[in-house]
Amino acid sequence: MTCVLERTEVTLAEIKFEIIENIAVLSESPKGWKKELNLISWNGREPKYDIREWSPEHEKMGKGVTLSDEEVKKLKEALNNIDK
């Protein structure tokens, strides 16, 4: 049985972002990358909350999650209900 995989190339448009507010640094790796909570405008759109890792000069970013105001409110409620 032979399996043939097709190669697909995807060119992504340039992603533009503006960090409106740095809210918190959640952690930092030994190489200087920081996991941050920021308010970011992506491609000129309305700013949203964003959690992801950033290189020291914010030149590179890791995968992250972007949250609306309503999602942040629900996340805050959920975190407040966690018993430690």
Image (tube, rainbow, N blue to C red):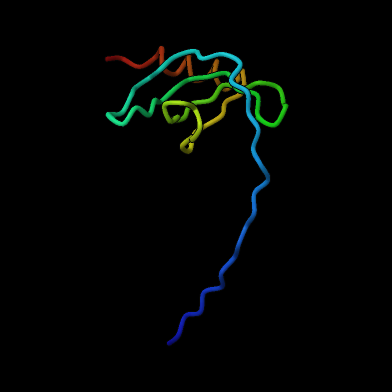
Please report the residue visible at 55 percent of the width from the left and 15 percent of the height from the top: 73
Expressed as whole percent of the image width and height from the top left, the position of residue 7 reads: 56, 69
Give the quarter of the figure containing the C terminus: top left
Give the residue at the far bottom of this rendering.
1
Residue drawn where x is 46% and y is 30% of the image: 52
- Residue at x 39% of width, y 25% of height: 34
In the drawing, does residue 67 fall left or right of residue 3? Answer: right
Up the image or down, 35 lies above or below 2; here it is above
Could you say which is closer to the camera, residue 53 or residue 84? 53
The spot of residue 78 in percent (x, y) is: 44, 18
Q: Quadrant of residue 79?
A: top left
Give the number of callouts. 0
Residue 28, given in percent of the width and then of the height, sits at 33, 24
Classify the position of the N terminus by image quarter: bottom left
Q: Nearer the viewer, residue 40 or 73?
A: 40
Give left or right: position of 53 versus 20. Answer: left
Whole-percent x and y of residue 70?
61, 19
Residue 47 picture quarter: top right
| 3 sits left or right of 45 in the view | left
Which of the two residues, 76 or 38, is positioned nearer the viewer here?
A: 38
Relative to residue 12, is residue 68 depicted above or below?
above
